C-alpha cells in the first residue's frame, strides 16, 4: 500500500490549490476578529439570515499592503476596518503546511462597506422613528437659565478640561455647576459605560438642568458606539435635554441626530450653553426695562388721576360749602323775618299772665293782672 507523509500531502494540496486558484478573487465577508500587529490578522465569516456561521476562514494582510489599504479605507469611510464590519476584499488563496488554508488580502473596496454602513444607519433611524422616540429629546424645553450640568466624559479627556474652562471663564461672568459622570467613550465597552452613566443621572434628574456628552480628541474610528441603536434609544428617551459634542469632523452620528442639541466639539457645547444663558440675560434686561417703563407710565397716569380727583374734590367741597352758606343765609333771613321783633313791628302783641302766654280770654279770671308786650314796650292791665 502506497502512503504519503503529511508534508507530502500538504505539498500536493498546495500544488492543487495554486493551480485551482491562480488569480485573486473579490470576496464579501464580515470581520469577526481583527488583530493589528503591523501585519493584520483577521477572521472572516459569512452568516446566514439567522446569524448562524455559514463559513469562516483566517485571513492575513501583510504590513506594507495593510498600511496602504487601511489608510485608504479610513480616508473614504471615516473608519478603520473593525470587527462587525461588512467588507469586500480582494484575496488570494494560500495554503501553508503548518497554518493551513488562509486568505491573503490584497485590496479592499470601501464603497461596499459605505453602502452597508449607510444601510445599517438607515435601519436604525427607521427603528427609532417606528418606536416613536426619534424626536423625543429634541422636543424637551430648555430651562430658562441653565446652571446645573451633568457631564458624561472620560475624566482625563482634554475635551472635558476644555469644556469646563470655557464655561468658567466666559465673558458674561455667568456661573455654572458641573458634575462629571466618568464613562468609557470608545471601544467595545463604551455603549454599556455611557448608558450606565445616563442611568445614574436619571436617578437624580431633579438635580440637573441638562446633560452634556462630550469627547475630545481620538480617531473618528472610535465613534462607532454613537451609531448603535441601544445608545441612541437611551439618549432619545432621556428625561433631560442632552447636548452632544463628541468630536465629529465630517459625519453626524445617530446620537447627534436624536439628542436635543448637537455641536462639533466640547468647547462648542460650552459656548452654546453660555449663549443660551446670555440670551436669557438680554431678555431679562429687556423685561426689566419694559417693566420700568410700564411702572413709570402707570405712576404718571395715577398721578394725573390723583390730581384730577384732588381738583374734583376741591371743586365739590367748595361748591357744597357755597350751597350750604346760601342755605344758611336763606334760613337766617327766614328766621329774621319771623322773629318776634318783626311780628311786633307789624302791630301784633303778646299777652302774658304770670309769665305765660294767654291764648284764650276765658282763661283769665277777673281782677287778674296781665302784661301786654308791644314793639316798643310793655303795658300792664287788670281784667274786668
Image: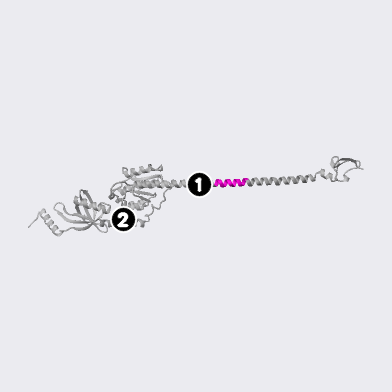
Rendering coords of residue 157 (x, y %): 31, 44
Q: Secondary structure at mark 1?
A: helix
Residue tagged by mark 1?
291
Residue 243 in view in this figure: yes
Categorize mark 1 by other alpha carbons within 10 Å: few (<14), some (14-19), many (20+): few
- Image location of residue 19, percent across then percent down: 13, 59
Indicate the position of residue 151 as horizontal and vertical percent values. 36, 45
Q: In front: 180, or 114? A: 114
Q: Extreme left residue here?
A: 1
Q: Which residue is mark 2?
A: 121
Q: Which residues are magenta?
A: 298-310
Inspect the magenta stretch and tell me whether residue 283 lies in it: no
* Residue 338 in the figure: left or right of residue 14: right
Name the residue located 13 percent from the left edge and 56 percent from the top edge: 14
Residue 201 shows in the view: no
Res 53 quadrant in image: bottom left
Q: Nearer the viewer, residue 310 or 340?
A: 310
Secondary-structure class at tag 2: helix
* Residue located farthest toward the right when viewing the structure as drawn: 384
Instruction: Give the number of the mark in front: 1 or 2.
Output: 1
* Left-right relation of 150 to 327: left
Q: Is residue 373 left or right of residue 46?
A: right
Amino acid at each position: 500500500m502506497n502512503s504519503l507523509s503529511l508534508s507530502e500531502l500538504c505539498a500536493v494540496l498546495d500544488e492543487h490549490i495554486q493551480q485551482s486558484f491562480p488569480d485573486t478573487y473579490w470576496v464579501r465577508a464580515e470581520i469577526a476578529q481583527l488583530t493589528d500587529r503591523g501585519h493584520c490578522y483577521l477572521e472572516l465569516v459569512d452568516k446566514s439570515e439567522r446569524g448562524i456561521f455559514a463559513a469562516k476562514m483566517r485571513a492575513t494582510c501583510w504590513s506594507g499592503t495593510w498600511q496602504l489599504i487601511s489608510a485608504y479605507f479610513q480616508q473614504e469611510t471615516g473608519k478603520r476596518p473593525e470587527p462587525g464590519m461588512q467588507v469586500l476584499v480582494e484575496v488570494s488563496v494560500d495554503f501553508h503546511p503548518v497554518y493551513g488554508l488562509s486568505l491573503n488580502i490584497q485590496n479592499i473596496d470601501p464603497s461596499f462597506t459605505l453602502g452597508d454602513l449607510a444601510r445599517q444607519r438607515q435601519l436604525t433611524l427607521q427603528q427609532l422613528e417606528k418606536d416613536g422616540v426619534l424626536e423625543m429629546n429634541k422636543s424637551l424645553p430648555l430651562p430658562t437659565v441653565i446652571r446645573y450640568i451633568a457631564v458624561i466624559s472620560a475624566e482625563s479627556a482634554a475635551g472635558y478640561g476644555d469644556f469646563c474652562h470655557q464655561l468658567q471663564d466666559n465673558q458674561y461672568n455667568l456661573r455654572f455647576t458641573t458634575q462629571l459622570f466618568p464613562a468609557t467613550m470608545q471601544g467595545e465597552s463604551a455603549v454599556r459605560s455611557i448608558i450606565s452613566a445616563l442611568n445614574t443621572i436619571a436617578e437624580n434628574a431633579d438635580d440637573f438642568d441638562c446633560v452634556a456628552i462630550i469627547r475630545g480628541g481620538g480617531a473618528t474610528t472610535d465613534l462607532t458606539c454613537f451609531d448603535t441603536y441601544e445608545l441612541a434609544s437611551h439618549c432619545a428617551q432621556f428625561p433631560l435635554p442632552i447636548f452632544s459634542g463628541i468630536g465629529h469632523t465630517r459625519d453626524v452620528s445617530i446620537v447627534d441626530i436624536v439628542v436635543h442639541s448637537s455641536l462639533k466639539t466640547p468647547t462648542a457645547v460650552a459656548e452654546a450653553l453660555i449663549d443660551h444663558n446670555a440670551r436669557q440675560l438680554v431678555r431679562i434686561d429687556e423685561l426689566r426695562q419694559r417693566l420700568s417703563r410700564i411702572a413709570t407710565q402707570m405712576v404718571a397716569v395715577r398721578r394725573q388721576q390723583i390730581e384730577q380727583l384732588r381738583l374734583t374734590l376741591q371743586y365739590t367741597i367748595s361748591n357744597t360749602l357755597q350751597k350750604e352758606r346760601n342755605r344758611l343765609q336763606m334760613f337766617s333771613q327766614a328766621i329774621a323775618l319771623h322773629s318776634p321783633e318783626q311780628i311786633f313791628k307789624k302791630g301784633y302783641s303778646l299777652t302774658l299772665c304770670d309769665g305765660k302766654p294767654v291764648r284764650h280770654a276765658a282763661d283769665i279770671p277777673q281782677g287778674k293782672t296781665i302784661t301786654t308786650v308791644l314793639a316798643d314796650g310793655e303795658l300792664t292791665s287788670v281784667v274786668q
